[in-house]
Image: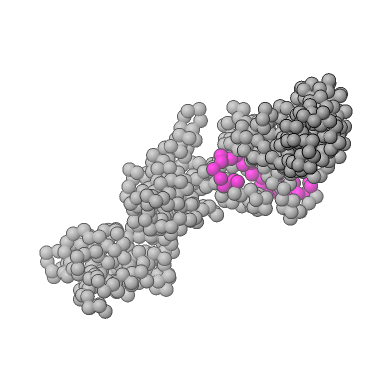
């Protein structure tokens, strides 16, 4: 339809190489099309037809020798012999060596009165070079890519980039030799780059190349942002555009002028595109259960992020064995979304770990905050004693290793059990004395800010309790501890610059350094079955009664009166032994009413100087 619309343009005068029906029929074997119906169904038919329309200044009749550009943007060569009686007096040669012979010419008038000319050929049609041939014409730039496409492992991809591909229109994001050199440098060991021969022998190369072939044409200035399906399993590349008219695919800039082909375009890129770890898992029939589980646990967005991630991917057989051991179905496993997410996080390390790295003691703390034990026996890698059956499947945001068993989570303690195991004996004693052990051993999720033992000793001294034993006898012990508890799980990554309501009711407010006053969070995300524990360097005290009274703008006279009556310490933290009070707090208006109604009290100063002021105030407590 696009070609028809272009040729129906009243403003144009066109010169068309016009194949007869016989010429189209002769081309069917070369195109791999069974019949005319299959030819008409080809997505690249418009490209082929544009290749028959010459871009000239007005109609050109007779044809003249020379190189001419077609409406497709690819050139053809016109050869005109000196002998007009020759059977091949006029030939138009396209990308292939065999051209078409012009048997006759005919001028026609368009609907708008414009004159066009048809140069009729009966022997064949012009076929523009397909994507593979366009890339092959630039060996100096794409020799490594072409060597990969010429391998047996990619014979199907090479065919897809040729003429006999059913007419599919595609884009080849073509890595240059320099792009492959950079990749081989990154895959080298101990400073020695991977060789080209090793690259071509690497089974992963076929995966990578497939990820560089996308459906449709991606051209700067003519494409909208979005995902494009590739030949790599369910892998999509993401096309983005910038205000400068630049186009990026997975963050890699495309050349401003791609090379046109008969069935798409070739975009040279200076960096290899890599599928993300989820797409790598999707590419294997052996890890379909993992992919489904990642979706159920809502971890796909995380693992398609920038990374890097190392994913130890259990096979389908590994999941079957795990389910049999746990006496549960896959549906039951998926139904516990939170538990499933934690199990899967045990298989993800937030860094890139290749097999060669395992000997160098690389950090292996997982997203589940558990350490993995990585060992090598010969060339084999084991993770927590489980064999890695297929290793070093690189992706754009990490690496995937296939494992033959599900890595099970270590038995997880409750918050009280965790505090005990971590040596927080003073905290455990205080929790027990305050009657909070059932809550922190129960099923309700809490985030517990855990002071070290020395922090309790310092707090006991600062509060005038003498020692920790006296601290445990404070009536307000439960309130102090509840100030260290937040309902739900507050991950360490979300503490900075955040405010949380404590179980006590007062807010915990942390700055960008995870400090609240002089209190600092020194360790985060110790996981329990019923929540998280973060370590703090001090016992945190909620606002005292005096803090509350002095912070209320309607109680300024009361605050001044307490100070005048030397009662502020009574409502502060130090030296009160944890006494608990309820204060019926007269507002400033209440005090003013007292002054207005008593002639013996001249003003506020007189009120504050009253000898019985302490007794009046204590009557409100």
Q: Position of residue 252 (x, y in %)?
A: 43, 45
Residue bounds of the magenta highlight: 302-326
- Image quarter where the N terminus lies is bottom left
Of residues 438 and 52, the one nearer the viewer is 438
- Specify whether residue 410 is in view: no
> What percent of the width, then of the height, locates residue 70?
27, 62
Horizontal side of residue 7 vs 414, given as left or right: left
The location of residue 198, given as percent across then percent down, is 47, 37
Which residue is painted at 73% across and 27% down in the image? 538
Outermost residue toward the front in this view: 599
Residue 40: quadrant of the picture: bottom left
Q: Residue at x 29, y 63 (%)?
A: 71
Q: Height in image: 74 above or below 196?
A: below
45 on left or right of 524: left
The colouring scheme, among rainbow, by chain, secondary structure or one colour, is one colour
The stretch drawn in magenta includes residue 541 = no
Q: Is residue 187 left or right of residue 90?
A: right
């Amino acid at each position: 339809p696009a070609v028809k619309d272009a040729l129906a343009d009243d403003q144009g005068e066109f010169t068309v190489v016009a194949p007869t029906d016989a010429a189209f029929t002769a081309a069917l074997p070369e195109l791999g099309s069974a019949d005319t119906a299959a030819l008409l169904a080809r997505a690249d038919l418009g490209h082929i037809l544009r290749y028959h329309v010459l871009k000239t200044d007005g109609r050109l009749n007779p044809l003249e020798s020379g190189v001419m550009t077609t409406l497709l943007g690819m050139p053809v060569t016109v050869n005109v012999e000196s002998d007009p009686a020759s059977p091949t007096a006029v030939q138009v040669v396209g990308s292939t060596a065999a051209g078409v012979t012009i048997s006759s010419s005919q001028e026609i008038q368009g609907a708008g009165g414009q004159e066009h000319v048809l140069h009729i050929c009966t022997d064949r049609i012009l076929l523009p070079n397909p994507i593979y041939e366009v890339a092959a014409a630039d060996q100096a730039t794409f020799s490594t890519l072409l060597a990969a496409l010429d391998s047996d492992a990619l014979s199907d991809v090479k065919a897809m980039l040729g003429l006999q591909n059913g007419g599919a229109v595609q884009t080849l994001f073509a890595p240059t030799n320099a792009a492959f050199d950079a990749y081989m440098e990154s895959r080298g060991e101990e400073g020695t780059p991977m060789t080209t021969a090793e690259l071509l022998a690497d089974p992963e190369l076929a995966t990578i190349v497939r990820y560089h072939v996308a459906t449709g044409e991606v051209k700067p200035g003519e494409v909208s942002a979005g995902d494009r399906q590739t030949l790599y399993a369910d892998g999509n590349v993401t096309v983005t555009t910038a205000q400068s008219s630049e186009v990026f695919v997975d963050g890699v800039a495309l050349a401003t002028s791609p090379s046109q082909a008969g069935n798409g375009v070739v975009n040279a890129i200076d960096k290899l595109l890599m599928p993300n770890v989820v797409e790598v898992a999707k590419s294997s029939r052996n890890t379909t259960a993992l992919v489904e589980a990642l979706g159920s646990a809502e971890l796909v967005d995380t693992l398609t992020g920038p990374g890097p991630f190392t994913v130890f991917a259990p096979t389908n057989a590994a999941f079957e064995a795990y389910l049999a051991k746990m006496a549960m179905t896959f549906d039951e496993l998926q139904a516990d979304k939170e538990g499933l997410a934690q199990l899967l996080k045990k298989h993800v390390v937030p860094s890139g770990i290749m097999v060669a790295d395992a000997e160098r003691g690389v950090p292996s703390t997982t997203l589940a905050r558990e350490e993995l034990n990585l060992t090598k026996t010969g060339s084999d890698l084991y993770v927590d004693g489980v064999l890695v059956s297929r290793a070093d499947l690189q992706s754009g945001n990490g690496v995937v290793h296939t494992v033959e068993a599900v890595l099970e989570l270590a038995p997880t303690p409750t918050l009280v059990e965790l505090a005990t195991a971590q040596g927080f004996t003073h905290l455990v004693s205080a929790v027990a004395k305050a009657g909070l052990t059932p809550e922190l051993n129960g099923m309700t999720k809490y985030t517990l800010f855990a002071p070290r033992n020395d922090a309790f000793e310092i707090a006991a001294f600062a509060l005038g309790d003498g020692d920790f034993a006296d601290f445990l006898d404070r009536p307000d012990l439960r309130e102090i501890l509840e100030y260290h508890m937040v309902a739900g799980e507050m991950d360490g990554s979300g503490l900075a610059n955040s405010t949380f309501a404590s179980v006590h009711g007062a807010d915990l407010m942390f700055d960008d350094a995870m400090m609240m006053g002089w209190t600092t969070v020194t360790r985060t995300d110790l996981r329990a079955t019923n929540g998280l524990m973060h370590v703090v360097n001090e016992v945190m005290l909620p606002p005292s009664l005096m803090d509350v009274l002095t912070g209320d703008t309607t109680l300024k006279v009361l605050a001044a009166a307490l100070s005048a009556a030397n009662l502020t310490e009574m409502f502060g933290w130090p030296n009160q032994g944890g006494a608990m009070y309820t204060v019926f707090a007269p507002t400033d208006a209440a005090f003013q009413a007292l002054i207005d109604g008593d002639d013996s009290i001249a003003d506020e100063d007189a009120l504050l100087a009253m000898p019985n002021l302490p007794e009046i105030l204590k009557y409100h407590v």
